[in-house]
Image (cartoon, coloured by chain):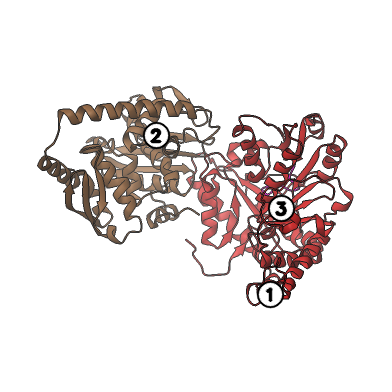
Amino acid sequence: MWEYTDKVQHHFLNPQNVGELENADGTGDVGSLACGDALKLTLKIDENEIITDAKFKTFGCASAIASSSVLTEMVIGMSVEEASKVTNEDIANALGGLPKEKMHCSVMGREALEAAIADYRGMILPMAEGEVVCECFGVTDLEVIRAINESNLRSVEEITNFTKAGGGCGKCEDKLREILRKTVGEKVEAAATGTKTRKMTALQKIKKIEEVLEREIKPGLRKDGGDLELIDVDGDFVTVSLRGACKSCKKSQTTIKEYVEKKLRELVLDTLIVEEEE
Amino acid sequence: MAETNDKIVYMDNNATTKVAPEVVDAMLPYLKELYGNPSSMHTFGGQVGQAVVEARSKIADLLGAQPEEITFTSCGTESDSTAILSALRTFPEKRHVVTTRVEHPAVKSLCENLETLTGHKYKVTRLKVDEEGMVDMAEYEAALTDDTAIVSVMWANNETGNIYPVEKMATMARARGILFHTDAVQAVGKIPINLKELDIDFLSLSGHKLHAPKGIGVLYVKRGTLFVPFLTGGHQESGRRGGTENVASIVGLGRACELAAEKMDEENTKVKKLRDRLEKELLSRIPNSRLNGHKTARLPNTTNISFEYVEGEAILLHMNRYNICASSGSACTSGSLEPSHVLRAMGVPFTAAHGSIRFSLSIYNTDEEVDYIVEKMPAIIESLRKMSPFWKGN
């Protein structure tokens, strides 16, 4: 049996905002029966572009249902602009994390939200315009590239966990490997160039780390009753101490590596190594 | 996630079974005071060796085999691999294996590895199945060639319970000089088996599917069949499988086989009656539900039902709240992304394949448990369907 957090179990057993809004201002319909999960998200948006209501209908497993439920709770009250910035990591974090094999459920939530906002704005989703690389699950190259960049993916297995691409017949694995090689190569190149042009002093690095912790990381942890304190920065080694609910959480190592380290690498320096104070 | 502390309603016996109390009693002395090595020369080890001899005999009796045809292994998977690899080593000039598209992963994965990890040195023919999950005997006959080293066809399917005509298939293979293996892990103890009269060369069984513990298996090798060991080492098992015997489990399996022989009628009457009632009630009370598998050529304990437009893992987790244990062919339960290869091979549409639930009963199940499941399931399915974007109601 999967190890689901209490929050996933709660949202699965007590899903919020189930249903379909009549005369919705934006509708996002993603997934399919063949894929094994599908989500229909409907939004009501007022004249100030505030999402006043959201409802979902989901065909899928506990993670898919929980991701949909928590997504509706998150976006009600947000402006469309704010909602457009919600990532799949935000959805997974709001649930206290998902098993890595189930991350695609949070991606489905984000995709439905994007589709609903695009529908509201009368736009076509750019992701749908890519070339389909995984025939089994209809995943485009643009979706794969985006997942690699956003979630720092480094293997075909990780791509499958996040996008489902490659999870069917497996014939697209070579294509996925090639996309991964190219995308990661470009990232490394860009990072190398970026590092050269903005080589940071130790003080600049510490300040940047503190800024990202305050702006990007701590608010997410506080939502779950936790917190974090920066203890030391020694070269690329960043030592932190978890506080509140995060300290006693069984998944504290996942929080450190999958959330804090990923964010710091993405927004400060991609060579940083985050460790918890012993 | 369970909501009550009531007793567990266990209908997942094709996954594993309760160890019978009689089996535990038989094993205990060999976990406590009788700890000698059966290969030792002293009397202390000798009496343990005698217990292994007796267990071997009991297992042979259930299968209609001779004791010397029984080799102990660690599990069904080891038995399957040993049989197939032995055949390929016996006939190194032959490079072809015939099997089906609905085999257990123990055989399915081995066959895939034989193709890919050996650089396609071996060719595997996987027989198609029809919508009820049965093979076409004409296709089978056509698949047998001079290059075929072994046929491996399961006796009964773990997901649907379908029983395959292995007796006839073995005879057809024998006529072509081809070895025949059957993965009988789900069949042994549930339906009568008499290997004496059959052309089956290898048969695999696993203890934990018939109320013995996990970690003990058997490979039957017909007398006279050429054999190459998979595990070499000491002289245990007449040189057929090295490694000190798992004595307590062997004794337990012997007792479990004895019990299975005694309770075979109960399996085919009481268990079948319970299964049939459960199946009929669920199919009639829950709209858009369908049976996966053959209506009659099926194990007495298994029913596989799809509830359309809902997903299996979600169903199982709701069942778990009521302490009901079963399995699903849904991809989401396994970490795979494709639903059961068995259901897909049968052409079960996606609308149904994702929402399949397998109930597998045993002699320990009761009428009250069937009533309980029949009472809980309709509301579980209804609540999930209300959430499904594909469900349009009746």
Horizontal and vertical percent for residue A133?
A: 46, 25
Chain drawn brown in the picture: A
The alpha-carbon separation of the residues under discs 2 and 3 comes to: 47 Å
* Residue on which the image places disc 3: B185
* Corner quadrant of residue A212: top left
Q: Measure the alpha-carbon separation of dots 2 and 1.
A: 60 Å
Going by the numbered disc 1, the residue's amino acid type is Asp
**Could you say where residue B150 lies in the image, as x and y percent from the top left?**
76, 38
Q: Mark 2: few, some, or many residues within 10 Å (few <14, many ≥20)? A: many
The chain coloured red in the image: B
Q: What stretch is highlighted in magenta?
A: B153-160
The residue type indicated by label 3 comes to Val
Verify whether residue B290 appears in magenta.
no
Q: Mark 3 lies on which chain?
A: B
The local secondary structure at tag 2 comes to strand
Q: Are marks 1 and 3 on the same chain?
A: yes
Residue B330, x across and y down, in percent: 56, 45
